[in-house]
Image: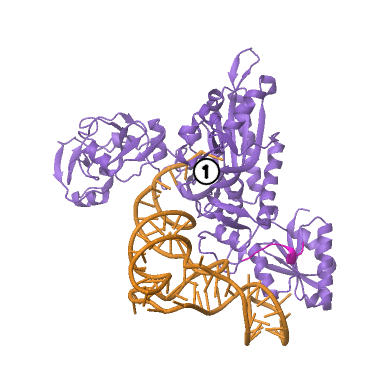
Chain colours: A purple, B orange
Amino acid sequence: MKVSEMLIPTLRETPAEAEIASHKLLLRAGFIRKTAAGIYTYLPLGMRVLKKIMNIIREEMDRQGAQEMLMPIMQPAELWHESGRWHVYGPELMRFKDRHNRDFCLGPTHEEIITALVRNEIKSYKQLPQLLYHIGNKYRDERRPRFGLMRGREFIMKDLYSFDRDEEGLDKSYQKMYEAYTNVFKRCGLTFRPVEADSGAIGGSTTHEFMVLADSGEATILFCDSCNYAANVEKVSVPAAGADPAGEKLEIKEVKTPGAHTVEQVSEFLGVEPHQIIKTLIYKTDKEVVAALVRGDREINEVKLYNALDCLRLDLADAKTVEEVSGAPVGFAGPVNLKDIRIIADPEVAQMVNAVTGANKADTHYINVNPGRDFKINIVEDIRMVTAGEKCPNCEGRLKEAKGIEVGQIFKLGTKYSKALKATFLDEDGKEKPIVMGCYGIGVGRTMAASVEQNHDEDGIIWPVSIAPYHVIVVPISTKDEQQVRIAEDIYKQLLDKGIEAVLDDRKERPGVKFKDADLIGYPVRVVIGKNAVENNTVEIYKRSTKETVNVSIEEVINTVQQLLFPQV
RNA sequence: CGGGAUGUAGCUCAGUUUGGUAGAGCGUUCGGUUCGGGACCGAAAGGCCGCAGGUUCAAAUCCUGUCAUCCCGACCA
């Protein structure tokens, strides 16, 4: 297509709203425009990239025997009541009513829809297994949409659901998807890493997240420097080190600590190390108020805490609640003589000797506190955040930290939804059983943004060939020079004939403008036709990723471009 | 949802402290000169100063409310 006839509204300056590279560049290069917070319109170039990513996904899903379908965005509340998630999901679920006052939601995911479908259509083990997917818009009323395409309220997602007779079948489906995902992200030219993850509110057991490594990523992953262990920090669990050989348990004593309510202040005031302090955090769940204890030098891992408490909601308690249960201002709560709430402690805390804790009294702490003797722990469970530098749970290596963008996640769901929605089948033995399910998502728009995060420089985007909106831009230097124009058009047509996706920059702009735009948009290859083409039969071929230029004769252009784009051919 | 900030031309921003009726650069249109890395000269179009109230002879500017957007945190298949 001719650039003069295309809608590619590039911007010289970065819109003030954008913060990270992908957001800035996708806006500047004319791929997306914001419609509302967290809601974007994909312009023609953006749509082309999306289609490329979606087609790669389709090919890899289909290769594993999956079948594409299309499910509704608008979903009736009754299905969500059946699964129980109408209440569980909370305000993130976009809800609305139709004219008859019936409740609906905009689907954030499609377990309910597909499980309801499958329960009606699949009756026998003979119809299993099935891999069904679709690509469509999803809605989540994020508290805080941000970073452009990274965290939107409306986003495009591929979600696939597997249906098997048993766990063994599920393992196979899961393995297929693991492979498919690896292929998808490889083909998209991304540097990524599958990591173990927490299964979160969706339920289920085994799960991996596919993380694109990028500093702007919102997720923190820990990986081992000597084995292949890698996991989301939320999931990482290392055994508590052995107890200090610390000796005798001393007598508990109350000390004044005026104004010291953070671990740092207390440790400074009393001259003790943070790891000798027990940090007491009061949490509120939908059922109860609990005290969570971790060592003073550790942070709480709320995902672990949430899982350990078996609740639907978990929030740090407000100051009022803290004062009610502890009888002291925030900062002086401690497990000793705490009002009758449950106490959950990290294993590290359980083995502490002569620790320091809040005394549930303003400006007061206890020293020489010993768990078991001075207070009772109801639950001992790993609830702390593991940090870089700690020992790998699988080997003797050390953990390192990296930031990642979660572009895909695969789950073994088991029978949670099939039981809730009564999706059963008759097995060979004549018994009715719930279908064993898995679900597998890829954020399509997020994959596009992640690619830009990983592939850009100060001049703009550097698309991998596989997902570039076009392969080549042909640029005649002077649109007044008829010979240049003729040569450019000729090369452009030849490229199209070879199946190479080319555009012709026929705009009456100065060369600098065209070059800047081409770099910004990120065409992998640029062919420049200038005086040399007319006088010496030579054109210039520029590779965006390396900024290298080669001069070749007009006859060699097509071949050279093909080699640059598809080196294996 | 807590904390912070910002809404003035298509984009980036000045003007708000000290009220006096709207500005710059870029972009757009027209004419001309240019033409290998975001040219230059000249002319022009384009704004209910987020919205609604209030104070005032007079409000982009002061006050109140409201909406939107962004950042940090919390949260998040």
Mark 1 chain = A
Residue at position x 67%, y 74% from top?
A512
The answer to which quarter of the image holds residue A61 is top right
Which type of secondary structure does the marked residue at label 1 adopt? loop
Total label count? 1
The image shows residue A355, relative to residue B31, as above or below, that is: above
The answer to which quarter of the image holds residue A238 is top left
Quadrant of image for the N terminus of chain A? bottom right
**Residue A342 spot, x, y in % from top left:** 29, 30
The image shows residue A151, relative to residue A163, as above or below, that is: below
Q: Is residue A5 magenta?
A: yes
Residue A378 appears in view:
yes
The answer to which quarter of the image holds residue A3 is bottom right
Magenta-drawn segment: A1-10
- Tell me: B33 left or right of A27: right
Residue at position x 63%, y 58% from top?
A31
**Residue A378 spot, x, y in % from top left:** 30, 28
**Residue A438 spot, x, y in % from top left:** 58, 31
Q: Which residue is mark 1?
A: A140
Q: Looking at this view, is A36 or A316 the one in front?
A: A36
**Residue A516 spot, x, y in % from top left:** 65, 70
Q: Is residue A159 magenta?
A: no
Residue at position x 42%, y 42% from top?
A391
Residue extending farthest top:
A430
The overriding secondary structure of the stretch rendered in magenta is loop
Q: Residues within 10 Å of mark 1 (few under 14, many from 20)?
A: many
Q: Amino acid at mark 1?
A: Arg
Residue A353 appears in view:
no
Residue at position x 14%, y 41% from top?
A254
- Tell me: A219 left or right of B73: right
The image shows residue A365, relative to residue A42, as above or below, that is: above
Q: Looking at this view, is A413 or A350 the one in front?
A: A413
